[in-house]
Amino acid sequence: MKKGDNFINKVKEKITVHDIERQTEDQVTITVDRNDLPEAVRMLYYDMGGWLSNMIPNDERQLNGNFALYYVISMEGGKMTPEDELPQEQKCWITVKTYIPANDPTFPSVTCKVPAAVWYEREAFDMFGLKAVGLPDPRRLVLSDDWPEGLHPLRKDAMDYRHRPDAVDHQDEPDYKFLEPSGSGVVDVPLGPLHITSDEPGHFRLYCDGDTIIDADFRLFYQHRGMEKLAENRMNYDQMGYLAERVCGICGYAHAIACIEAAERAVGIEVPLRAQAMRVICLEIERLHSHLLNIGLACEVTGNINAFMHIFRIREFTMELAQLVTGGRKTYGNVVMGGLRRDMSSAEIKKSLDLLVTIEQQLIEVWDAVMDDKAQVGRWKGVGILDRQVARDFSPVGPNVRGSGFARDSRHDHPYDFIDQLEFNVAVENGCDVYSRENVRYKELLESISIIRQCFEMMPGGQTIIKPQTMIKPGAFAIGNDEAPRGENVHWIMHGNAQKVYRWRCRAATYNNWSSLRYQFRGNTIADAALIVCSLDPCYSCTERVTVVDINSQKSKVLTHKDLKRYSQTLKNHPLKNM
Amino acid sequence: MKLLDMTRKYGNATYNYPFEPYKVPEGFRGKPAYDYEKCIGCTACAVACPSNAINVKLNEDKSKLVWEFNCARCIFCGRCDEVCPTNAVLLSDEFEMAVRFDKDNLKERGELDVECCQKCKNPFTTSKLISYDIERLKKAGWDEATLAEKTKYIRTCPECKKNIAVENSTQYFVRKRK
């Protein structure tokens, strides 16, 4: 009995499974009829303890005349109670695949049964024109509002990747329909197009009653770069890793690893142990600087500039550490298929160990001081509650879900590389609020330091790279996963001809966190809105203004980045006073 | 208050950059430095470059082979450094690359002499690459005759070499038929 067979047998009892394909030891794909799709996903998700990790629409008309959908479910147990977790040897990935005929591109929506699929299915329509019938929220997600109707860019025959549709004049641009609560006394607060903490584009609309947010809606993807299309058309495997590394400005390395490992797993390439250990070290260094950035920003957005500066002082050490072992502060650029390009010398390891001592010591010192600050902790506690049932429904990842008491950690559930030989604890907090999430990050910082130390101590010898055999199999596909600072990154690659990918699906950690954000906003004040978004550690490529709409008077006001930031820091001069 | 004490304890955390130089650690991957003297124009770097920052092309009148590096496209991965057979491209410690007004200042060029084919007189490679090849072959320890045999077609372009090979083999077939 191989991994995942027990779940598949249970699915078979109710649903006809046409085909079972095994990609790796812990990755299985089952093919079902499109009408059975929602039920199959629901059974795996709710009945057997799965979480939706990714959904890949794919244009396979060249291969078999159909479109295909792949729902990637991570089988790890519901985790609502501590006992409700699968034993380690049963954890696996099950992909539910279904074909959609090219002449009838519709499928029954899974969202009605598993809410986590909502963003994926909206994106499937934007990019491929695959219509989810019964989808509760069929608005546009990825494409901009002035993008022509009926042009679905990721279809193989839709367009050349260099093609740009004609721009629409600013005044003719269609308006995005935000969800609007009805009732008197609701104020609409648009927050965007640049976010307060991370200066990236996203448009938030907060609906307020007085000072309390009663609902929220948001529009993102202002910086969609079409990387997936670019990779399919132009990039070979030598270039893919570098492209994936540029998905994110903070956790890029995690993307590079996930992408390359997906490609490696699809054809069964085993990476040398030394390279595996070094990949883990670089990922953990990235977690160090990313978490320090986020804790720093969570202090800054509540006005504690002093703590922010101290945390950034420590962060500089982590950047130096990265510079030391990889040769670059941020983009490490050393991942290629088959291993790593740059080895670490023992002198570098020795210096790194010294740096780690400094980081650990000063981190504990600053964190204790921040925790002593009652005002600071007061701003964090009880804010931005992520309800446990909402979390279960929407499959959030990373510190966001771990702050709500779910021990979901890709390093623990689906160990990759060298991780299974290391000892570490999954940081979990039960408060569900911003305070818990920041606490999770702090605990993880200490865990990361310990992981890096263990890796350095156990560092296997030998080479760091093997020649990736020229055995790219067109049509072979697999999942690559790793725990980025913001949560699990899941990439999916299908190999194509001529050393190029047929389809690359890159799912960043934050993608899974956005859909539950709306529920986290509810019941909080406007001053905390920025903090809540910050606690997610969002990774969107953020927002200058916030529109506030008053439900009572139906008036709206656009707040600038500075207004809102000043108000969240000082809590003085309410921005809506003069409405 | 604790935080303020800490500030006093650690003192200045910033460097006085740009008024004092910022030292990078050994093995830092900075801007690729190009050594024109060493470059043989083999185009290995241009093939390896994942972001197309390095291009090697013939100029318009086909009199020179132009090695061009556009720093604005460079991602500092160091592939060029890795593949260069003569260490003409090496990553340096330099990281200050801002230019004012003209982005063309980010480009670096090197023009190499081209070698024309003995037969068709079209340029096909650089003179430096050929002398480099001969140099390397000499080091293999062959006698003059073998060397001459080995380098017989070295100044012929691949296209002409192909034609010669085809001609030679057809002669062989014709003779065989007789």
Image: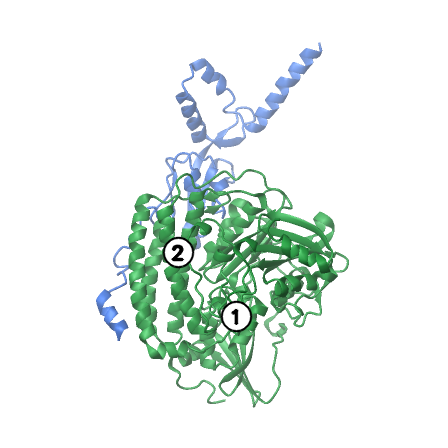
Chain colours: A green, B blue
Q: Read off the residue under disc 1.
A: A202
Depth check: A428 or A499 in front?
A428
What secondary structure is found at the residue carrying circle 1? loop
Labels 1 and 2: the sequence-earlier one: 1
Q: Image check: A545 left or right of B178?
A: left
Expressed as whole percent of the image width and height from the top left, the position of residue A124 reads: 65, 62
Q: Residue at x 63, y 18 (%)?
A: B169
Expressed as whole percent of the image width and height from the top left, the position of residue A170 reads: 59, 72
Expressed as whole percent of the image width and height from the top left, the position of residue A145 reads: 62, 69
Expressed as whole percent of the image width and height from the top left, the position of residue B140 reads: 41, 21
Label 1–label 2 contact, CB within 8 A: no
Depth check: A323 or A374 in front?
A374
Residue found farthest to the right: A103
Residue found farthest to the top: B178
Labels 1 and 2 share a subunit: yes
Q: Read off the residue under disc 2.
A: A285
Above or below: residue B176 compared with residue A554: above
User: Which callout, 1 or 2, points to the residue nearer the camera?
Assistant: 2
Question: Is disc 1 surrounded by few (<14), some (14 to 19) or many (20+) residues within 10 Å?
Answer: many
Q: Residue at x 34, y 65 (%)?
A: A312
Marks 1 and 2, how far apart in space?
A: 28 Å
Residue found farthest to the front: A83
Depth check: B99 or A182 in front?
A182
- Snapshot quadrant of residue A55: bottom right
